[in-house]
Image (spheres, helix red, strand yellow):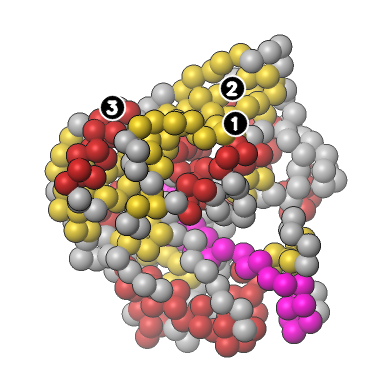
C-alpha cells in the first residue's frame, strides 16, 4: 500500500482536482479494506478513485483520504458446458476486461467496449451504452460493507438496478458509499455471436436488424469506432476525450412532456408505464448549444475563456481543453443546463460525481 499526497487531477480523465490530505494506492483487496477501515475508524472522509472517469473534483482538493483502487485479477469459472463466470477485481481496467472476455470466446459485454474506468465502478452506475448495460450480465458483486465492517455478496436482484442507478449508488455513509465493490462477476455463454443488437445506429453499421446478433468481435470494433468518433474513448492526445464522458443523463419524463416538444423529438419507452426516456444530446442541441460551445469564436467563449467547452464531437461531453479548472467545466455545464431548462422546462441531471462542488 502506497501513501502520498498528490494532485488528484492526475488520476481523472477530466484532469481537474487539487490535492487530497492523503492519497492511498490500494494494490490488493486487503490494502483496500484496511485503508477504508482505518479512515472510517478515525472519522476521516473518504474519496474512492478507480479510473477517475466519473469524477469532477474541486480545484482546492479533497479534505480527507483519497483511496485509489488498483486491485488486479481476472478469473474464469466454468458453470456448465456453455456457461462461464468471469470474475474481475474492482481495479481492473473495464475495456481490458471486455477485450479479455471476447478473446476467451464469451459474448455479452461487447457493446460496452471503450467505456473508460474500472470494473468495480460498473455496477454502481449500472454503466451502459448502445442499448446494453451491466445489469444484463452481472451475476453478483462482492462488496465491503463499511457500516458492518465485513464483506458480503450482493446478487443481481439485490442490487436494484435501474437506469444509471443501483442500490450501491443510493446507499451512502456521510456522502460516501456504504458498499465498496471488491470484485464483480459476469455470467456468459460461450459463443462468437454478440448479444442482440438493440441500438439502431449500431445495427445499421453492422448491417443487421435491431434484435439480431452479429460477430461479437465485429461489434466491439464498430462500438470503438463509434465512441472514438464522438470523443468517448479516452486518449491522451485527444482533448475531446478529456472529460467525464456524458455529463448529463438522458431525462426520464412523463409521456405528456412529449406534447410540448418539437415533433420528432427522440424518445424511448422505459419499463415503467407512462414514462419515456429523452435524448439529452438532442435537447442540448435544440436548446442552441452546438458542439464546441465555449470555444473562442462561439457565443459561450466568455464563460470559461475557452479553457473548457462542449466537445467538438458530441454535445454531451464537457471537455478540458488543456488548462481548465473544475469551475470552468461547471460553468459550461451550468449554462447548458439552464438553457435546456429555459427552452424545454426539463432539468438535466449530472452523471459524474461532483466532489465538494455544486452544479
Q: Which mark is residue 85?
A: 2
Q: Which residue is mark 3?
A: 30
Q: Nearer the viewer, residue 245 or 233?
A: 245
Which span of residues is magenta-colored? 233-261
- Residue at left offset 15%, top offset 39%: 3
Does 258 lie within the magenta span?
A: yes
**Badge 2 or badge 1: first in the primary sequence:** 2
Name the quadrant of the C terminus: bottom left
Q: CA distance from mark 1 to mark 3?
A: 23 Å
The local crowd at label 1, few if under 14, some if 14 to 19, many if 20 or more residues have their Cα within 10 Å, is some
Identify the mark nearer the N-term, 3 or 2.
Answer: 3
Tell me, yes or no, whether the two marked residues, 1 and 3, touch with CB atoms within 8 Å.
no
15, above or below 33, in the image: below
Q: Is residue 86 magenta?
A: no
Residue at the (22%, 58%) spot, across then down? 62
Q: Is residue 126 left or right of residue 327?
A: right
Vertical placement of residue 4 versus 265, above or below: above
> What is the quadrant of the N terminus in the image?
top left
Would you call the spot at circle 3 few (<14 residues within 10 Å), some (14-19), or many (20 or more)?
few
Q: The residue tagged with tag 1: helix, strand or loop?
A: strand
- Is residue 353 shown left or right of residue 275? left
In the rendering, at what x and y percent does residue 74 appear? Answer: 46, 23
Residue at the spot of label 1? 139
Residues marked 2 and 1 touching at CB (< 8 Å): yes
- Judged from this view, the residue extending furthest toward the front is 148
As helix, strand or loop, the secondary structure at mark 3 comes to helix
Measured Cα–Cα span from mark 3 to mark 2: 23 Å
Q: Is residue 222 visible?
A: yes
Q: Residue furthest right?
A: 209
Would residue 25 be seen by someone viewing this image from the given angle?
no
Q: What residue do we see at 38% from left, 46% from top?
A: 178
Question: Residue 209 at x, y = what percent?
Answer: 85, 46
Amino acid at each position: 500500500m502506497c501513501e502520498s499526497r498528490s494532485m488528484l487531477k492526475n488520476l481523472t480523465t477530466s484532469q481537474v482536482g487539487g490535492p487530497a490530505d492523503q492519497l492511498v494506492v490500494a494494490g490488493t483487496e486487503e490494502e483496500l479494506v484496511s485503508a477504508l477501515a482505518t479512515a472510517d475508524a478515525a472519522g476521516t472522509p473518504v474519496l474512492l478513485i478507480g479510473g477517475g472517469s466519473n469524477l469532477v473534483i474541486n480545484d482546492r482538493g479533497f479534505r480527507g483520504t483519497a483511496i485509489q483502487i488498483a486491485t488486479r485479477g481476472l478469473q474464469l469459472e466454468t458453470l456448465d458446458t456453455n456457461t462461464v463466470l468471469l470474475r474481475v477485481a474492482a481495479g481492473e481496467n473495464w475495456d481490458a476486461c471486455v477485450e479479455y472476455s471476447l478473446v476467451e470466446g464469451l459474448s455479452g459485454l461487447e457493446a460496452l467496449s471503450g467505456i473508460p474506468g474500472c470494473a468495480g465502478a460498473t455496477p454502481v452506475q449500472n454503466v451502459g451504452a448502445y442499448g446494453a448495460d451491466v445489469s444484463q450480465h452481472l451475476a453478483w458483486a462482492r462488496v465491503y460493507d463499511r457500516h458492518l465492517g465485513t464483506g458480503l455478496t450482493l446478487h443481481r436482484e439485490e442490487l436494484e438496478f435501474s437506469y444509471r442507478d443501483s442500490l450501491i449508488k443510493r446507499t451512502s455513509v456521510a456522502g460516501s458509499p456504504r458498499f465498496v465493490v471488491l470484485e464483480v462477476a459476469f455470467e456468459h455463454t460461450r459463443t462468437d455471436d454478440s448479444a442482440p443488437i438493440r441500438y439502431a445506429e449500431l445495427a445499421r453499421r453492422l448491417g443487421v436488424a435491431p434484435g439480431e446478433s452479429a460477430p461479437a468481435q465485429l461489434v466491439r470494433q464498430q462500438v470503438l469506432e463509434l465512441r472514438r468518433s464522438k470523443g468517448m474513448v479516452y486518449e491522451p492526445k485527444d482533448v475531446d476525450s478529456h472529460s467525464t464522458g456524458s455529463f448529463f443523463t438522458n431525462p426520464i419524463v412523463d409521456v405528456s412532456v412529449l406534447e410540448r416538444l418539437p415533433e420528432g423529438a427522440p424518445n424511448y419507452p422505459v419499463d415503467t408505464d407512462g414514462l419515456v426516456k429523452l435524448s439529452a444530446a438532442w435537447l442540448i442541441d435544440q436548446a442552441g448549444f452546438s458542439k464546441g460551445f465555449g470555444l473562442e469564436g462561439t457565443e459561450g467563449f466568455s464563460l470559461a475563456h475557452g479553457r473548457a467547452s462542449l466537445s467538438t464531437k458530441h454535445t454531451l461531453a464537457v471537455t478540458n481543453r488543456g488548462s481548465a479548472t473544475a469551475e470552468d467545466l461547471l460553468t459550461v455545464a451550468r449554462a447548458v443546463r439552464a438553457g435546456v431548462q429555459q427552452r424545454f422546462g426539463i432539468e438535466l441531471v449530472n452523471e459524474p460525481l461532483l466532489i465538494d462542488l455544486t452544479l
